Image (cartoon, rainbow, N blue to C red):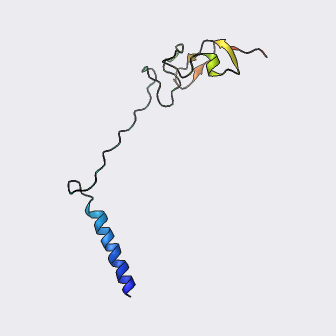
């Protein structure tokens, strides 16, 4: 019987301690909200998030693309050529890449 009373008191005390500090301005901890990351914007000049490049339809360079040419994009498949950014900034246009000879 005594153990049951002790457990009930302990639970009640824990509840009071947990819920007493929930109101802001009463010495409780109120963390600063973490700002949400803005989604990548295709064509804003910055390669962010899931973007591979940021010059929709344009040629890749060292600033605007994660891969700057066809060989750096896939050295096993291409021997040269110019890599373009896809219209969605999440893909590349390899239409001007020169494939390796078989």
Instruction: Tell me the residue at 73%/15% (across/down).
Output: 100
- From the viewer's perspective, is residue 1 above or below residue 59? below
**Residue 95 image-quadrant placement:** top right
**Residue 73, position as x, y percentages in the image:** 62, 21
**Residue 5 image-quadrant placement:** bottom left
The image quadrant where one finds the N terminus is bottom left
The image quadrant where one finds the C terminus is top right
Q: Residue furthest left?
A: 25
- From the viewer's perspective, is residue 15 above or below residue 64? below
Instruction: Tell me the residue at 42%/21% (across/down).
Output: 44
**Residue 61, position as x, y percentages in the image:** 52, 14
Residue 97 in sight: no
The mark total stands at: 0
Would you say 9 lies left or right of 83 here?
left
Would you say 14 lies left or right of 24 here?
right
**Residue 33, position as x, y percentages in the image:** 32, 44
**Residue 85, position as x, y percentages in the image:** 54, 18
Instruction: Tell me the residue at 49%/18% (across/down).
Output: 64
- From the viewer's perspective, is residue 27 above or below residue 63? below
Q: Residue furthest right?
A: 102
Q: Nearer the viewer, residue 83 or 61?
A: 61
């Amino acid at each position: 019987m005594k153990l049951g009373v002790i457990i009930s008191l302990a639970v009640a005390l824990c509840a009071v301690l947990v819920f007493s500090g929930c109101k802001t301005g009463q010495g409780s901890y109120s963390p600063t909200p973490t700002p949400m990351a803005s989604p990548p914007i295709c064509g804003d000049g910055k390669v962010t998030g899931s973007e591979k490049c940021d010059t929709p339809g344009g040629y890749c360079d060292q600033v605007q693309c994660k891969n700057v040419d066809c060989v750096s994009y896939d050295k096993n498949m291409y021997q040269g050529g110019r890599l373009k950014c896809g219209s969605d900034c999440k893909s590349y246009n390899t239409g001007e890449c020169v494939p390796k000879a078989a």
